[in-house]
Image: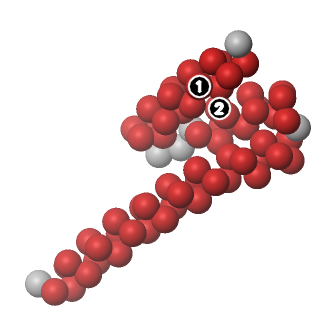
């Protein structure tokens, strides 16, 4: 039951984050902390946030390089 709740919350958080730009940590951290504790929940949620940061930074760098060539 808990895994289903986390899975559904992950999909909802991802949908919110793709539109608004935030939401993964706000939704998943409290739910995950119920099972594993706050410290581990914050550490676990930082992994997808770091991935999003690198994807966003990579997109920005490609755009800047393309813009500078023209």
Q: Nearer the viewer, residue 20 or 49?
A: 49
Outermost residue toward the bottom in this view: 69
Residue at image position (58%, 50%) is 48
Q: Position of residue 36 (x, y in %)?
A: 85, 35
Left or right relative to 68: residue 56: right
Q: Position of residue 32 (x, y in %)?
A: 76, 33
Q: Is residue 15 above or below residue 5?
A: below
Which quadrant is home to the C terminus? bottom left
Left or right relative to 50: residue 55: left
Residue at image position (57%, 31%) is 10
Left or right relative to 67: residue 2: right
Point out which mark residue 56 bears.
none
Helix, strand or loop status at disc 1: helix
Task: Work out whether mark 1 precedes mark 2 in sequence or the reverse, and give the earlier one.
Answer: 1
Residue at image position (63%, 18%) is 4
Residue at the disc numbered 2? 27
Q: Residues within 10 Å of mark 2 (few under 14, many from 20)?
A: some
Q: Are marks 1 and 2 in contact (CB under 8 Å)?
A: no
Q: Nearer the viewer, residue 13 or 2?
A: 2
Q: CA distance from mark 1 to mark 2?
A: 12 Å
Left or right relative to 13: residue 60: left
Q: Residues within 10 Å of mark 1 (few under 14, many from 20)?
A: few
Point out which mark residue 7 bears.
1
Q: Which marked residue is nearer to the observer: mark 1 or mark 2?
A: 1
The number of numbered discs placed on residues in the rendered structure image is 2
Q: Position of residue 22 (x, y in %)?
A: 53, 43
Q: Quadrant of residue 35?
A: top right
Q: Position of residue 5 (x, y in %)?
A: 65, 19
């Amino acid at each position: 039951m808990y895994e289903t709740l986390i899975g559904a919350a992950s999909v909802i958080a991802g949908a919110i984050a793709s539109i608004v730009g935030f939401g993964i940590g706000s939704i998943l951290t409290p739910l995950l902390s119920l099972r594993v504790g706050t410290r581990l929940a914050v550490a676990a949620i930082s992994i997808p946030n770091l991935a999003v940061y690198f994807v966003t930074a990579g997109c920005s760098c490609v755009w800047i390089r393309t813009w500078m060539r023209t």
